[in-house]
Image (cartoon, rainbow, N blue to C red):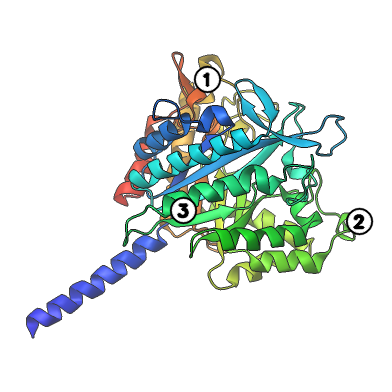
Amino acid sequence: MKGLQLTTLLLVLAYFTIAEASRKVEVSCSAFLYGQNDWEVKQDTSRCIEEVHRIRNNCGGTKINFVITQFWIDELNVGKINSFGTKLGNNVVPVSPNNLRVLTTGMNACFKAAVNLGFTTIEVTPHIDDGMGRGGWRNALVMNPLHKYDGDFSYYDIIIRPVVNAINAVISGVPPGKRVHIYMSMQGEMNFMLWKFPTEWHRMMNIIRRSLPTGAKVGISVNFNKLCGLSFCTPDIVSTLNISSIKLLLASIDFLGMSSYPSVSPQPKPTDFQRDVVTLANEFKKLGINLQNLLRAPHKELHFSEFGIGGATCTHQPATSASEAVKCPYYGIFGDYKASTDPWRNVTMRRFISDYYKAAVKWAAMGTGPTFNVSHIYMWNVASWDVTGIYHTDTNAQGSYKVGDVVTTLKKWNDLNTSP
């Protein structure tokens, strides 16, 4: 009898251990892919695969996010789409059946590498950027995802379908008994197009659900503010929207991702990291949507699909103090790594970024909250936000944006369950 009781106790403990592990909020990393240069496989590897290995080594954990970017072409610079492109070398070239096949085979190889390295949650956050290099913000773009703008290709054709095909090819090869969780966002930080074409995005969501493996989650990812593009949602803008269709779209998603660059205190506290969610909730109110009620729906999750702080001032210069950096956390230093413009080389700033991620991990260890619970947190691993050194241009002979204390903090939490 005692043996049976001991066995029962061990089974109960195992159950709660597994359940607790499934609820654990990691502070995870993202693989950034800015075109064929990053996902094309050459000599059995790719930049994407190399990023996955760095994420395993520098971030750890079980979750990984893939931020995949294609481009829109606006030839007349009038805020409209003429066609789509992909980056090849230093140029954006027109999308073609051939480079879409390269996208599928490249992402298939990269997803497979992630699964082989022990990642059990794969999230995808697709982006499209301004292919003319004029600095257009995707958040303000008005786009029907199913319309073939050049007569041949739609947004669905140039990024969603190839990635879904790559996911399916990988999942079909996963051994029985091994579960890989798939989260497919339909877009990232592209708010206004959702509200202008909610019916078409809803239709695409149903297409994706039918195409992905059973159990895969489909969602959207928005910016924490400016839900109506370049501006906030004023009554004049809201009056042009089909709010009932927007509510139907939101009711249908499995998860809501958001870009979160919270303006924390110079001495960060765990609860600071909920600030952007409160901002987003206030933004949704302008659309007549209660975010708390939306997230109370069964199995609906809130994700940080972009997270971090760039270490720049509001004039885009390297910050020299925490007080400067926290005012515009969504600003950073772009381009190949340069020691002369690395904000984290400053001893004060290096201490601040270490404290920032220790506070973020403490918040994750608390289960996030207290008002809004976030289940997935993914860092923005590019340029000066990339303090774990994932993207290839963020490390060179001059040095790296990688901060050793941050790597140690994340690895201890994500791999060993040790909070600072």
Helix, strand, or loop for circle 2?
A: helix
Cβ atoms under marks 2 and 3 closer than 8 Å: no
Q: What residue type is labelled 1?
A: Tyr
Q: In the structure shown, which secondary structural element does the residue marked by tag 1 occupy?
A: loop
**Location of residue 19 in the rendering, given as x and y in whole percent from the top left corner:** 35, 67
Quadrant that contains the N terminus? bottom left
| Cα–Cα gap, marks 1 and 3 | 30 Å
Instruction: Identify which residue is drawn at 74% across, 56% down.
Output: 283
Residue 288 lies in what quarter of the image?
bottom right
Q: How crowded is mark 2: few (under 14 residues within 10 Å), some or many (20 or more)?
A: few
| Left or right relative to 237: residue 273 | left
Give the mark toward the camera: 1 or 3. 1
Given this view, does label 2 or label 3 mark the residue nearer the observer?
2
| First of labels 2, 1 by sequence position | 2
Left or right placement of residue 266 versus residue 82 in this view: left
Q: How far apart are marks 2 and 1 (CA)?
A: 43 Å
The answer to which image quadrant residue 72 occupies is top right
In front of the other: 23 or 177: 177
> Mark 2 or mark 3: which comes first in sequence?
2
Picture residue at 43% right of the left edge, 49% below the top: 170
- Numbered badge on residue 363: 3
| Residue 326 as seen in the image, left or right of residue 94 | left
Q: Label 2 sits on what residue type?
A: Asp
**Mark 1 lies on residue:** 337
Is residue 117 or residue 391 the one in the foreground? 117
Classify mark 3: residues with Cα within 10 Å, few (<14), some (14-19) or many (20+): many
Q: How far apart are marks 2 and 3 (CA)?
A: 38 Å
Residue 62 seen anywhere in this rendered image of the structure: yes
Q: Residue 236 carries which label?
A: 2
Residue under the image location 54 percent in, 32 percent down = 382
Which amino acid type corresponds to the residue marked 3 in the rendered image? Trp
